[in-house]
């Protein structure tokens, strides 16, 4: 551990340009801070989804409702989408942390689960920034553009949409994965190869879930 431990803001910003140094300062006492980063990310994701889905006509979101009077539920779709996105990310984040902890232990590591949750929180800073950008984008995008984007996205096919949904083609998602590799190395003292495998397995599981349920 480093003798000089930065404050919360220093940890959040520092993880973007000196992650190894910052991760070495993170311990179990930083669990609340890590969870705070994660909860802010979830709230931003929920809000951006609410804005996006609230602007797309229900007839495009659910073509089977074409011709049906949806005026009673049209205004609630954004809220439902936001709540769903928030719950999905929260559950996925928690499950992936538990899975990485289990894999880290099975790979011969001896790290703390609480510390892994804290480290995952700080490693999620790029994802938080991504969600912040999404909120801005959702606020300025018009309904027609969003509808066209949604139609184009839906036509990509199951494999590609599942791949994108697993954040494997997203710069911010890849940055988070890279930080997680360093976090796993720090917490479990594993080799780079084993750390990469530990981090990528949850993404593979998420991809398969998206593929078979999409």
Image (cartoon, rainbow, N blue to C red):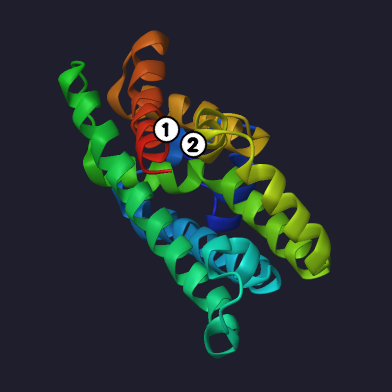
User: Element type at marker 1?
Assistant: helix
The percent coordinates of residue 186 (x first, y second) are 38, 26
Q: Is residue 53 visible?
A: no
Q: Mark number for residue 79?
A: none
Q: Residue furthest bottom?
A: 72
Q: Residues within 10 Å of mark 1 (few under 14, many from 20)?
A: many
Q: Residues within 10 Å of mark 2 (few under 14, many from 20)?
A: many
Residue at (58% x, 30% y) in the render: 174
Q: Is 191 above or below relative to 109?
A: above
User: Element type at marker 2?
Assistant: loop
The percent coordinates of residue 91 (x first, y second) are 33, 54
The percent coordinates of residue 74 (x first, y second) are 59, 82
Q: Is residue 94 visible?
A: yes
Cβ–Cβ under 8 Å for marks 2 and 1: yes
Q: Quadrant of the N terminus?
A: top left
Q: Is residue 118 left or right of residue 6?
A: left
Residue at (41% x, 18% y) in the render: 196
Residue at (74% x, 50% y) in the render: 149
Q: Is 33 above or below relative to 191?
A: below
| Quarter of the figure with residue 119 | top left
Q: Mark number for residue 207?
A: 1
The residue at which mark 2 appears reads as: 166
Cα–Cα gap, marks 2 and 1: 5 Å
In front of the other: 91 or 184: 91
Residue at (43% x, 65% y) in the render: 84
The percent coordinates of residue 11 (x first, y second) are 55, 47
Of the numbered discs 2 and 1, the one sitting upstream in the chain is 2
Q: Quadrant of the C terminus?
A: top left
Q: Is residue 126 left or right of residue 134?
A: left
| Quarter of the figure with residue 63 | bottom right
| Quarter of the figure with residue 48 | bottom right
């Amino acid at each position: 551990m480093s003798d000089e431990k930065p404050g919360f803001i220093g940890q959040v910003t520092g993880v973007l340009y000196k992650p190894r140094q910052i991760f070495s300062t993170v311990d179990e006492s930083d669990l609340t801070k890590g969870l705070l980063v994660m909860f802010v990310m979830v709230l931003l994701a929920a809000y951006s989804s609410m804005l996006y889905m609230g602007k797309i006509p229900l007839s495009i979101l659910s073509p089977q409702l074409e011709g049906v009077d949806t005026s009673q539920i049209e205004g609630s779709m954004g809220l439902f989408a936001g709540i769903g996105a928030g719950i999905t990310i929260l559950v996925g984040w928690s499950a992936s942390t538990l899975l990485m902890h289990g894999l880290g232990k099975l790979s011969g590591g001896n790290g703390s689960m609480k510390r892994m949750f804290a480290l995952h929180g700080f490693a999620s800073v790029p994802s938080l920034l991504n969600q912040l950008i999404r909120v801005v984008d959702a606020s300025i995008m018009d309904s027609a553009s969003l509808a066209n984007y949604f139609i184009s996205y839906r036509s990509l096919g199951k494999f590609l949409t599942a791949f994108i949904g697993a954040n494997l083609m997203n710069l911010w998602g890849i940055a988070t994965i890279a930080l997680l590799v360093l976090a796993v190395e720090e917490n479990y003292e594993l080799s780079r190869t084993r750390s990469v495998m530990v981090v990528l397995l949850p993404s593979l599981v998420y991809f398969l879930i998206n593929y078979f349920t999409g």
